[in-house]
Amino acid sequence: MNLKQLAHMLALSQTTVSRALNGYPEVNEETRRRVMDAAKRHGYRPNPSARRLATGKTGMIGYVLPTGASVDIDPHFVEFLSGLGDYARSHELDLVLSPADADDQETTYRRIVANRQVDAVYISSPRPADRRVGLVNTLGIPFIVHGRSEGFDFDYPFTDIDNEGAFHEASRLLIQLGHRRLALINGDDRETFAIHRERGVRRALAASGLALGERHVCSVVMTEENGYRATRRLLEAGDAPTAIVCSSLIMALGVVRAVRDLGLTIPGDISLIAHDDVFPWLRPENFSVPLSTTRSSIRLAGARVAERLAARISGLEEGARGEVWPVDLVVRGSVAGAPA
Amino acid sequence: MNLKQLAHMLALSQTTVSRALNGYPEVNEETRRRVMDAAKRHGYRPNPSARRLATGKTGMIGYVLPTGASVDIDPHFVEFLSGLGDYARSHELDLVLSPADADDQETTYRRIVANRQVDAVYISSPRPADRRVGLVNTLGIPFIVHGRSEGFDFDYPFTDIDNEGAFHEASRLLIQLGHRRLALINGDDRETFAIHRERGVRRALAASGLALGERHVCSVVMTEENGYRATRRLLEAGDAPTAIVCSSLIMALGVVRAVRDLGLTIPGDISLIAHDDVFPWLRPENFSVPLSTTRSSIRLAGARVAERLAARISGLEEGARGEVWPVDLVVRGSVAGAPA
DNA sequence: CAAAAAAGCCAAAGCGCTTTGGAAGACTCT
DNA sequence: AGAGTCTTCCAAAGCGCTTTGGCTTTTTTG
């Protein structure tokens, strides 16, 4: 059942039927009702391919997915996706993932924009001066950045959490508990979130006249194994920290294992606070010693990003407003006063 | 730059240019070369929207993503996606995720087929007599099932691993080591993979005249917490098992924690084997006691599914061939002879 | 060497929708 | 009553590609 048939059946022109269906004002309400009714009765659904060709609108949002044999998709992605999908569903939006060579995403961005394959895109895990942000900005497609980039001469719309504030608070708490030597096990420090977190830790330390030891900060891909290794290295060297702040729950698993392997305890010898993106399958309260966390649901962020994308597509949102969400500091058993 | 312009520029008809580009035989090789050359020089890329409208081909593969506030996307998904994306990239395929109400996926399947939004779909986490399989089969869109369904009067193409064989082997090893009371901590037993795994365990036990105790098998959503709880329940009851087979590495984390909480050791008191889908961020060899596993890369499966989908789209693959991959049994420190 | 076959190209008709530019009729106003 | 204004609808022109059917020109064939 296509528009032509429906129009013929109603003894109206395609124009009128199309307009009636799309809510244009220049059609009699009585007629509109008739059309709407017939459309529903016959289960008419406009052909999206045809509509795309005519309007350029696709009803899809895009994400360029970096791939490659040595590229691992972050497990956080799936949680973000849960939120995004949940919102997208209620608004009849689909998500198209365009796999790209991790080292050349630009080509793919250009392609999806030139081909008008999606109405909007989002960018995640941005770095300072991230080229993707500049690119989509010039290409002129609506977008939202999940996270923040920095160092542009233009503003852009983003949704981020207060990474610096969160890690500042976490560090401040540890300092108040008497810790003097903190360590930070961070994610990839080419990404903005990691830079902000480190800044938060440093600021808290500085406020008490302390500093983050050069060997007390490490930046690694966030795996259990890397959390373990980093912790071993930190604790086996001289000047070992008494408290660790860690950028992910997965790495925290490794931290806990390393501490135990060394015959130390949490929080007796080492206090630990990790960032929790809220995974349904791994919860900080279930660690052998319940883990203190800075908590922010990445899933909610996904829903919010979808919401903003939808708003931008329909013109409800404009401008370059960035929003920064606060992060909860949840204290559990893994922190205690510094050992004597 | 569109076809019309390119044709005009070459002083050829759109027909000829189109045919030259798409490899039709009725065009002079010399002409084809000229066309190809000019197309490349001017960076001509056919407009996909137009092409779709004309041919119905989209260059996209689809996945219906169950969503909802209480629906968690499996973290395995992201690894599968890595493989799928990696293959898709090299073949210029995009993946479209259509979020659907978890309780009504049928509507979405019908929509994406009716609208010709994708050229093929895949289905994951199938259950016995999974309605989705019957549906896409009748709808007539090319598809591959990742995993297996059962109980149809038709065959369908799938790629699965030998879950039964894997868990049979794992159990057999434990039995040979003298274990008499095995327990199985399984995933959702409405899914085929879980059923096959349980069957594997039972078959191995039966071969030695043993059986799986009624309270020695549990079926839960695969989270760390559920692994913990199941283990506590198993070990605190009378008739506790001396060996556990577990359906996921994430649950195994909980198993290990529970065993430790109870003051028991692995493998001294309890032997443990888990299934490993090969996550880059959590590796069995890095467990406090290196974990024995049945191993099969879900990422490779993703690539394979993409490959088969591509083959089916282009007509290279037909029929309903199912393929079953063998699973490695990797023995590490977490298994030992049964305690006296 | 004429007839038949093949090769190479083209004009035009879709694909199914949106949107432009009117046009006819109904209504208001002086 | 005639001019001007709305209201309501329509024909037709895109959007950019593929494909059908046919028309020349060249090559093959008996």
Image (cartoon, coloured by chain):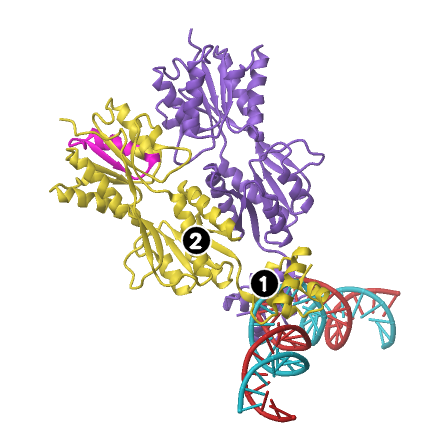
Chain colours: A yellow, B purple, C cyan, D red
For residue B12, which quarter of the picture?
bottom right
Residue at 27 percent of width and 28 percent of height: A333
Where is residue A98 shown, x and y percent of the image?
48, 52
For residue B63, which quarter of the picture?
top right
Residue at 38 percent of width and 17 percent of height: B266
Where is residue B135 shown, x and y percent of the image?
66, 42
Check the image and report above or below for A80 versus B326: below
Q: Chain of mark 2?
A: A
Q: Amino acid at mark 1?
A: Arg
Where is residue A4 shown, x and y percent of the image?
69, 65
Q: Which residues are magenta?
A: A228-251
Residue in the foreground of this view, choosing between A240 and A146: A146
Query: Which residue does the numbered mark 2 point to in the structure image?
Result: A307
Identity of the residue furthest to the left in this view: A209
Please tell me whether mark 2 sits on a helix, a strand or a loop: helix
Residue in the foreground of this view, choosing between C25 and B321: C25
Separation (CA) of disc 1 from disc 2: 23 Å
Query: Can residue B29 be seen in this snapshot?
Result: no
The quadrant of the image that shows the C terminus of chain A is top left
Q: Chain of mark 1?
A: A
For residue A145, which quarter of the picture?
bottom left
Residue at 39 percent of width and 56 percent of height: A144
Query: Dot 2: within a 10 Å radius of its alpha carbon, few (fewer than 14), some, or many (20 or more) residues?
Result: some
Where is residue B279 shown, x and y percent of the image?
43, 35
Q: Which callout, 1 or 2, points at the residue further toward the start of the chain?
A: 1
- Asked if the magenta segment contains residue B264, the reply would be no
Residue in the foreground of this view, choosing between B297 and A198: A198
Residue at 19 percent of width and 31 percent of height: A242
Query: Which residue does the numbered mark 1 point to in the structure image?
Result: A51
Check the image and report above or below for A30 versus A126: below
Left or right: where does residue A68 sit relative to residue B5? Answer: left
